[in-house]
Amino acid sequence: MMKIDLLNKKALVGGSTQGLGKAIAVQLAKCGANITLMARNEEKLINVLKELDTTYNQNHQYLVVDFYNFESYKAILTSFFNNNSVDILVNNTNGPESGTALQKNTEDFQKAFDLLFKTTQLTTSLALKAMESKGFGRIINATSISVKEPINNLVLSNSIRAAVTTWAKTLATTIANKGITVNNILTGIFDTERITQLNKLQAKTRSIAIEQVLEELENSIPMKRIGKPKEFAYLVTFLASEYASYITGTNIVIDGGLIKSL
């Protein structure tokens, strides 16, 4: 029987007060990991902290960070890693604003680069030092199916998440012999606050009911439903475990069969 055991493992999970990030933190804790939550709303962080499993006497904590303020983020994470190490790093942030290629300017792309790429690269580089000395590490990046099939109104996400996935592939091959794996999860449509927000925006733009937008989304997916955050968390937990020790440099799609490309 395969049982995922993350006892004594320390995990840092970004964007973990809601949606996919929260589901990941909850599931990793259930498997015994010590969790450090990261988000910008301290009240929400405290509430999620109370929900985390402590069956194995784990020591959970949180960091208040603003992914949109890179210099502040850099200072907080540098200080954290001066006194802490992690075995599992889940790079997950909220997405940038929606918009088409003609609606976004250079400054918009720079902000998205800081949000999605620079925070991921920085956090990973800080976490790697201890991982290398231990000979164990799991780096998991939550990206998007849009890196394979770009979404017209998400040009910022399309562009910068593609940069994250190619950077991660390069990193994975560089450190593959050190017991550290690096994998990207290409996220489809999940029942999160982000999707609800995008659905509301689309409903307003098209002057239709949000229920119609949701129905169209569900019908576009071969499984005829959107994903549950816990289903995403199960995949992350597997990749964080010993069972995934020979999986690295991959882009794993989880989308209910939505995208058509290989």
Image (cartoon, rainbow, N blue to C red):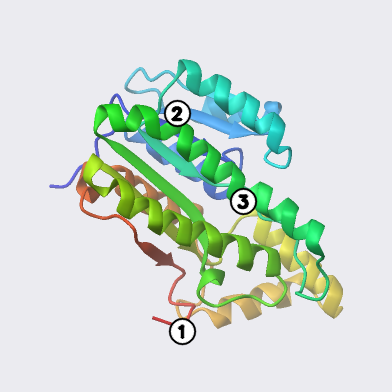
Residue behind mark 3: 116
Going from the N terminus, do you reach mark 2 or mark 3 first? 2
Q: Residue at x 47, y 69 (%)?
A: 255
Q: Residues within 10 Å of mark 3 (few under 14, many from 20)?
A: many
Label 1 amino acid?
A: Lys
Q: CA distance from mark 1 to mark 3?
A: 25 Å
Determine the residue positioned at 49% across, 77% down: 258
User: Quick one: label 1 or label 3, which is nearer the N terminus?
Assistant: 3
What secondary structure is found at the residue carrying circle 3?
helix
Question: Circle 2 — which element?
Answer: strand
Sequence-earlier tag: 2 or 1: 2
Q: CA distance from mark 2 to mark 1?
A: 36 Å
Q: Residue at x 57, y 82 (%)?
A: 219
Q: Of 121 and 11, which appears nearest the observer?
A: 121
Where is residue 134 shown, x and y percent of the image?
26, 28
Instruction: Looking at the picture, tell me which residue is in the foreground, 152 or 216.
Output: 152
The quarter of the rendered structure image containing the C terminus is bottom left
Position of residue 47 measured from the top left corner of the image (x, y, whole percent): 61, 28
Residue 90, image x and y in percent?
46, 43
In x, y percent, where is residue 61? 52, 21
For label 2, the residue is: 35
156 displayed left or right of 127: right
The three-letter code of the residue at mark 3 reads Leu
Q: Amino acid at mark 2?
A: Ile
The disc placed on residue 260 is 1
Label 1 crowding class (10 Å Cα cut-off): few <14, some 14-19, many 20+? Answer: few
Q: Residues within 10 Å of mark 2 (few under 14, many from 20)?
A: many
Question: Is 169 above or below relative to 180?
Answer: below
Asked whether residue 258 appears in the rendered view, the answer is: yes
State the CA–CA distance, disc 2 to disc 3.
Answer: 22 Å
Q: Which of 99 and 218 lies nearest the eye of the viewer?
A: 99
Q: Is residue 174 left or right of residue 216?
A: left
